[in-house]
Image (cartoon, grey):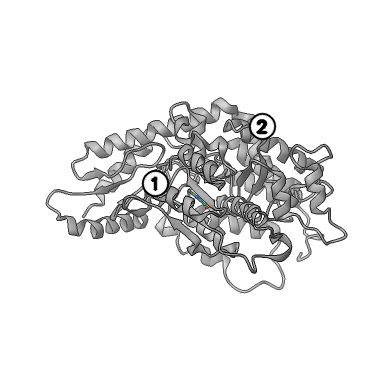
Amino acid sequence: MTDPLMDGDGEGVLRQVYDAAGPYLASLADRPVLDPAAASLPRDLAGDLPDKGEGAAAAVRRLLHVGTGAATHSAGPRFFHFVIGGVTPAALAGDWTASLLDQNAAFRNSSAFATEVETVALRWLRELFGLPEGYGGALVASATFANFTGLGTATHWWGERHGADIAANGLAGLPRMPVLSSGYVHASSRKALQMLGHGRESVEVFARDPVGRVDLAALERRLAGLRAPAVVIANAGEVNAGDFDPVADLADLAERYGAWLHVDGAFGLFAALSPRTAGLVAGIERADSIACDAHKWLNVPYESGFAFLREPARLAVAFGMPGAAYLPGAGAALDGGPGGTAPHPGYALLGPESSRRARSLPIWATLAAYGRSGHQAMVERHLDLAQHLAALVDAAPDLERLADVPLCIVCFRVRPAGVPEQELDDLNRQVGAALLADGRVFAGTTVYGGRVALRPAIVNWRTTESDITAFVEIVRSLIP
Ligand SMILES: *Cc1c(COP(=O)(O)O)cnc(C)c1O
């Protein structure tokens, strides 16, 4: 019983998951995001590590019971906190397939299949976003890792400019790498710089207002004064209001001063899918590196992000693994990488991970299933829903919109008549907490230009107008 070889019915447990999936997915349209009554359920999974296991059927039954009850149902249509997509049916099936096949997508020799599907998925993503042909990259776990990948590759480029081989010798003896950005820079870019040994405080912020909009003139003065290679981070889609740095202007500056341009487009890159918003990312085709998430607006399961490089061969410099006799070396990636002629040796040589799951499969499946126009339609539906939400906010006497809505995030606060300005921050924090405790819909608070606000983000393929209407009604009902 305790040995998987002896446990028997391997197919039965898969049927258990399948049988639970239908009712669970069907329930998402109406169920609350979080059921406060289910909060104690996970206790059923605690207890001591069993000596004699209960067998797969009983274990999986318990896991499904607790999971379908106590999970945060962010796959459903009313989760507007952070920026979190759902999972399209094709992506879910693709992800199940990835687990079924259990490929190690590290090397061609561990899975030629996964390596080839990853090449296709990356080409399709490049085409989806209209990036020029030379761009190539790797699938990574998240936009944090994509920022790490882009900024890591920039680090080696910067080392070269100083005559240093950072892959071999590290940063010792070098000056601090200058990193310039606007106030829109995301915490994960700082985290990436922290992981890379530059320090999260290495970012110099050039903002012209409390919201964080870029001060181009000050940023240019700094670049001109540096007289040394630098890295500029452009933020294509910031998390408070979905606003964009002027990517083309920053690309001009990067070009003029020989700087590396990294674009964090974790969700904002999807603006490229609609002619209505493509202007927001104009200039991105001049970036040296681009970071994006698939587990947000592409609606594939976690963990899924990707990085694109204008010169993808640079990835092998930063992430190759020479020195282990049983592994392909970095040189193999340079020969067989994007644009190379030899068969691709594997994406482990082009990104931070070594062994890695075949996360290309859900990406391939959703792109094959719904194509360019299906994903464009989804993005445009979300653009419409964001405008609809903005209109409902504008029409409500006790709500106040704080920002334009260029994309999929609506930044607003509750502002009932008669409440003095100095009490509004506390009130909005209170409403934010009440919203999460209530659980029917989820949205988070932020501080926008010094004021506490709600910032619902709409990126789930299941979300429709009635979910937006319900959201506004619930927020208003929770104003004390
Ligand atoms: C979400 C997000 C990230 C980080 O993405 P993870 O997938 O959580 O690592 C980075 N930048 C921006 C702008 C984001 O919205």
Identified by mark 2, the residue type is: Glu
Q: Which residue is mark 1?
A: 217
Q: Is residue 445 above or below residue 298?
A: below
Q: Position of residue 385 (x, y in %)?
A: 38, 34
Identified by mark 1, the residue type is: Ala
Residue at left offset 65%, top offset 37%: 135
Q: Residues within 10 Å of mark 1 (few under 14, many from 20)?
A: few
Q: Residues within 10 Å of mark 2 (few under 14, many from 20)?
A: few
Q: Nearer the viewer, residue 470 or 384?
A: 384
Is residue 196 toward the left or the right of residue 81 in the image? right
Q: Residue furthest left?
A: 418
Q: Which residue is mark 2?
A: 133
Position of the N terminus, as image quadrant, is bottom right
Give how far apart the Cα atoms at labels 1 and 2 are.
32 Å
Is residue 214 toward the left or the right of residue 348 in the image? left
So how many labels did they put on this image?
Answer: 2
Q: Position of residue 407 (x, y in %)?
A: 41, 37
N-terminal label among 1 and 2: 2
Q: Is residue 335 above or below residue 8?
A: above
Could you tell me which secondary element the residue under label 2 belongs to? loop
Q: Quadrant of residue 164?
A: bottom right
